[in-house]
Image (tube, rainbow, N blue to C red):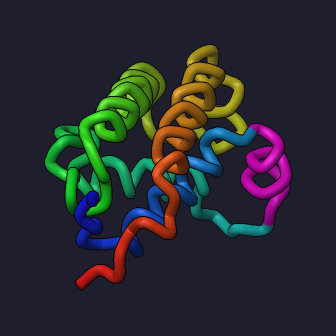
Amino acid sequence: MEQPIQYPSMRSELITYLEELADLEYQRRHWLGGSHGAKSMFDYAVHFFFDDTDLGEDPSAYIGVFLFDQSEAEHLSKLVNVLDVLIDRHGTTCNDQQFTQLPEWPQVTRLAHEALEACRGRGLDRCGDGE
């Protein structure tokens, strides 16, 4: 039997960001036309991957923390690598609409979808109670 992960709430947060990054229609409705104020919704996801966690450096370090295994870490590694390239190429001053129009954006949504499917395949109900 698989061991539960340590922080199921962080896994839930990860799933939320993956859902948002994978769904163009969601982005159109909530990021581009929403009333979220001055803060970029894409910015929240970037902060989770690169600032709040070290997923941008080493997703494997989060196996047992909020990832179940190396497969999930590999999917996230592909996504954060593309996000890193996107930010290196275009900076951080673009707004959400500008980011979603960049030529790299379809790759971001595809890799987010693949990572989401890898994580969802495990089921959030298998996270354990965090103790």
Residue at 23% in and 64% down = 3
Residue in front for this viewpoint, 12 or 106:
12
Q: Quadrant of residue 72?
A: top left
Q: Does 113 sit above or below residue 107?
A: below
Q: Is 22 left, or right, of 82 in this rendering?
A: right
Q: How far from the left and from the top, in percent, is residue 119? A: 47, 47
Q: Is residue 121 above or below residue 53?
A: above
Q: Give the total of numbered labels.
A: 0
Q: Quadrant of residue 109?
A: top right
| Image quadrant occupied by the C terminus | bottom left
Camera-side residue of 9 and 107:
9
Q: Which residue in the rendered view is the most extreme toward the front? A: 1
Q: Which residues are magenta?
A: 24-34
In the figure, is residue 118 to the left or right of 98? left
For the point 27% across and 44% down, which residue is it?
69
- Can residue 21 be found in the magenta stretch? no
Main secondary structure of the magenta stretch:
helix
